[in-house]
Image: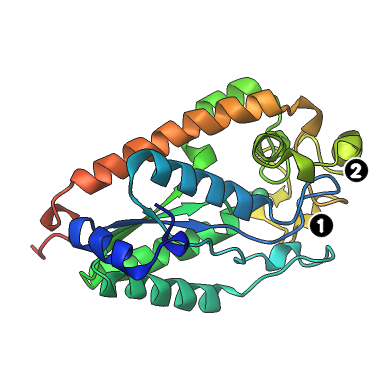
Amino acid sequence: MYLADHAWPDLESYFDAESLALVPVGSTEQHGPHLPEATDALIAEGFAREAAERTGYLCTPTVSIGVSPHHRQFPGTMWVDGPAFRNYMESLTRNLAYHGIDRVIYVNAHGGNVEHLREVGRRLHEEELLYAIEWMWDNSITERIEEVFETPGPHGGPKETSLIWHLASELVHEDRIEDARDGGLASFDADTGRMYGARTFYDAIDNSENGVFGDQTDASPEIGEELFEAACENLVSLTEWLAAQSRSSLLPQERR
Ligand SMILES: [Zn+2]
């Protein structure tokens, strides 16, 4: 059920019967020469709407601008800073609580949002207002991603390329996929941008000329469909698990 498509009497019946909401959270930022800046927003919305469709739970409109200042050197990247994003997400989540929602899944597709969504969830949990958790599709299928791609890359790599090829193929510049690999950093690993254990960089451009990481030539719409299905199953299971929990089990434990 997609909130923005419905009139209030139908939403009233939903809030009378259910108390769970899926909130897609993405970004609008550079994803290399071959993918749209909406990549993370499209992925988050794709998962949240599909899981809502399959389970009957509510999906809200997408928060499509996130914490992306580390991509600002590339034209078009949009961002808000961390405190503004946390305030906005907290306010939006309090709005859902007002309508009776007591459990939320932030269906997130942007790494830069993770710590902020966790912090918002932690505070609202501590306050016993509601229970909100962050879910990111690729973290739910890490083993499969490592099997499929030699260098998945943390940003704009073959996993995101495959997903967008599956979800919105008209937005993929197929003729630039080799350029994406050749002009970026194909061999990203745990040592990239690190000195003696410290992370020495702040911006994507410090490690990648065109802003992306991984070997995009390993991407395909077929792999995108397979990964989408696998992660979507996890999101559906998570949604059903969360809906089945008692409210008291989602509150913080008493001080000892
Ligand atoms: Zn992305």
* Residue indicated by mark 2: 183
Relative side of 37 to 122, left or right: right
**Residue 54 x, y percent position in the rendering:** 39, 38
Question: Which residue occupies 73% across, 27% down?
Answer: 220
Q: Mark 1 is on which residue type?
A: Ile
Q: Earlier in the sequence, mark 1 or mark 2?
A: 2
Q: Say few, some or many: other residues with alpha carbon within 10 Å of mark 1 (under 14 / 14 to 19 / 20 or more).
A: some
Q: Is residue 121 above or below residue 218?
A: below
Q: Position of residue 148 (x, y in %)?
A: 63, 22
Along the line of sight, which residue is nearer the eye, 181 or 98?
98
Whether label 1 lies within 8 Å of ligand 1 gets the answer: no
Task: Give the quarter of the figure containing the C terminus.
Answer: bottom left
Residue 155 visible? yes
Question: Residue at point 67% right, 70% down?
Answer: 79
Q: Position of residue 155 (x, y in %)?
A: 69, 46
Q: Amino acid at mark 2?
A: Gly
Q: Which residue is mark 1?
A: 205
Classify mark 2: residues with Cα within 10 Å, few (<14), some (14-19) or many (20+). Answer: some
Q: Secondary structure at mark 1?
A: helix
Q: Tell me, for residue 80, which label it has, or none.
A: none
Gap between marks 1 and 2 measured at Cα = 11 Å
Number of numbered markers: 2
